[in-house]
Image (spheres, helix red, strand yellow):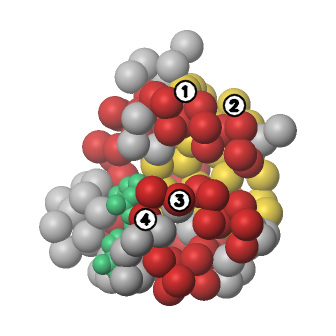
């Protein structure tokens, strides 16, 4: 079965939307294969966002993702990476369509409520980073 890594970011957890977001994925047809509430340390956060190290917002991004607990998940389903990304919506909530999670619950790119792996290789890399 295909699988992907999804994480409710600190803004989603703080707003009490964790269970609601999990439900959105379950309603879509995903199976929850693993999950945990956790606090990221800077090393894990920097490794997770390694591809964005050169960006001006990198420090702000690491500050944000380590600012409070996140809810990390492994989701299983057909074309898991692609189906999860389409349910999550565009990176910038201003571009995310209503009906997507970011379109419905976020307004700012810096706190866009949920993360989803962008490729099968990254899904496996992120699953090993969070669940080992
Ligand atoms: P993705 O989360 O849709 O895959 P990425 O390009 O991988 O998008 O960026 C990772 C995260 O970095 C985004 O989800 C967003 O929270 C944050 N981010 C992207 N662009 C900006 C920006 O211009 N300012 C602040 N944060 C940003
Ligand atoms: Mg990404």
Q: Are marks 1 and 2 in contact (CB under 8 Å)?
A: yes
Q: Report ligand 1 position as a quadrant.
A: bottom left
Q: Residue at x 53, y 36 (%)?
A: 123
Residue at the disc numbered 4 = 52
Q: CA distance from mark 3 to mark 2?
A: 25 Å
- Along the horizontal axis of the image, is 102 left or right of 15? left
**Quarter that holds the C terminus:** top right
| Above or below, comparing residue 87 to residue 75 in the picture | below
Q: CA distance from mark 1 to mark 4?
A: 23 Å
Q: Residue 73 lies in what quarter of the image?
A: top right
Q: Is mark 3 within 8 Å of ligand 1?
A: no
- Which is more foreground, mark 3 or mark 2? 3
Whether residue 106 can be seen here: no
Q: CA distance from mark 1 to mark 3?
A: 21 Å
Q: Residues within 10 Å of mark 2 (few under 14, many from 20)?
A: few
Q: Which mark is residue 3?
A: 1
Q: Residues within 10 Å of mark 3 (few under 14, many from 20)?
A: few
**Image x and y of residue 87, in percent:** 34, 46
Residue at the disc numbered 3 = 50
- Which is more foreground, mark 1 or mark 4? 4
**Image x and y of residue 20, in percent:** 54, 59
Q: Are marks 1 and 3 in contact (CB under 8 Å)?
A: no
Residue at the disc numbered 2 = 33
């Amino acid at each position: 079965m295909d699988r992907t890594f999804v994480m409710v970011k600190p803004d989603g957890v703080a707003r009490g939307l964790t269970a609601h977001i999990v439900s959105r994925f379950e309603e879509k047809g995903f199976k929850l294969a693993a999950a945990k509430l956790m606090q990221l340390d800077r090393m894990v956060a920097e490794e997770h966002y390694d591809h964005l190290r050169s960006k001006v917002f990198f420090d702000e991004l690491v500050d944000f993702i380590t600012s409070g607990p996140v809810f990390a998940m492994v989701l299983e389903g057909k074309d898991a990476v692609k189906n999860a990304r389409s349910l999550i919506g565009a990176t910038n909530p201003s571009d995310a369509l209503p009906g997507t999670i970011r379109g419905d619950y976020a307004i700012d790119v810096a706190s866009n409520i949920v993360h989803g792996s962008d490729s099968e290789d990254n899904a496996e890399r992120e699953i090993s980073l969070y669940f080992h």
